[in-house]
Image (spheres, rainbow, N blue to C red):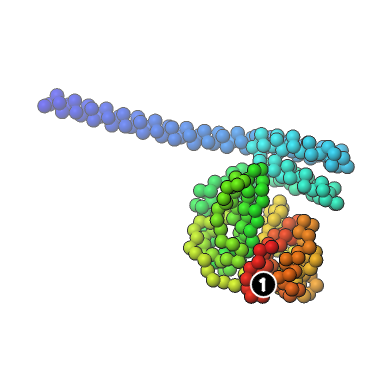
Amino acid sequence: MRRWGQAATRNAGDAEAGGARAGAGAGIGAGGRVAARRTQAEQRESRVAVGLSELERWLADQIGQGIAQARQSAPAEWDDLARRLVDAQAPGAAGTVTRLTRVLGAEDWPGLLLGEYALLRLLAVAHRRAAALPEPLRQTVRARVGYPVTRESVLATPAVRDHWDVVGCRDEEQDRLVARRVWLAGRTTGRLAMVLSFSPVGQPLESFPPPGATIDADLAFYPGASPLRALLAERRGLVDAGPPPGTKVSQVPALIAEVLAADPWSDSWPLVLDGAVACLDGLADDEGNALPLHPSAGVPWRLLAVSGGRPVTVAAEWTPRGLLPLTVWNEDGGAVRL
């Protein structure tokens, strides 16, 4: 019995020691994984820094040699530069370079191209000096460069509950994917939001209430100096409501100036305009203030027909080149998608 007891004690001790060794091994394994992730993050930071430094040099060369021949020679150079930025793990900056071709068809393309070059250089410099930036702006810079933000980390932040008006929706095809942007406006908070979803071409997109609906929901916002993109954290149901409260046309320049002061790279922002009068090439108010439409919008015949020349509530997407109308509310309070 004594020998059995001694053996049992030894076995228990061996098991405990084995468990301790296993625990230590697990701890080392976990620590190793953390160290590996840290190393990967540092390597990415280094690659991005090199890629953006190359971008700065390239931009300086373009300004030095002039842009007169950009229509002929630049697209091939942009493709090559975008590939190098992807290799440097800066997909956001690469996407901006890829989209430069859009400005070449405009009548004032030289000025537009110089503006895009300036924003690219500003992004590269901001990334290089990120340590000196306020945290919200640093997060904006990282997002524009293309660092990923996980869905889990966004949902872990405090959500904003409100009755959210669905003020607009647009689907666009991008690289064999359909991107759906849904714009929301909070009734109580006054906050604006954009919920973004993707799906392969031909596959159904995530369902969402149509423009004109109002939902009781919690939204979790992505980090940034001028947060707009959000995730639907919890949806409680639809709420009966009329047209959303809006902003006066005269207030828009100051509002957009505030947005751009926080995020100079912002090229899209939702607006809900109250008392807007549709014109052939813009939206005006009864005080003589007006906002131009984007050249691609054309004459807003549908908006003109619904409004009948009367002041109405209109939701539109602001862009640097003008407004893109999204939704109009008729005299009965019904929403009409534009």
Relative horizontal placement of residue 231, taking residue 104 as reference (left or right): left
The structure residue drawn at horizontal position 54% and vertical position 51%, both measured from the top left corner, is 154
How many numbered marks are there?
A: 1
Residue 209: % across, % down: 56, 61
Residue with the most extreme top position? 3
Q: Quadrant of residue 165?
A: bottom right
Q: Nearer the viewer, residue 246 or 313?
A: 313
Relative to 285, 10 lies left or right: left
Which residue lies at the image location 15% right of the left edge and 26% below the top edge?
A: 4
Vertical position of residue 47 compared to residue 315: above or below: above
Residue 141, can we see it? Answer: no
Using the image, determine if residue 179 lies above or below residue 164: above
Q: Is residue 25 above or below residue 170?
A: above
Which residue does the image show at 63% across and 50% down from the upper left? 179
Residue wearing tag 1 = 330
Q: Whole-percent x and y of residue 65?
A: 87, 38
Give me the residue at 68% from left, 70% from top.
313
Q: Is residue 27 visible?
A: yes
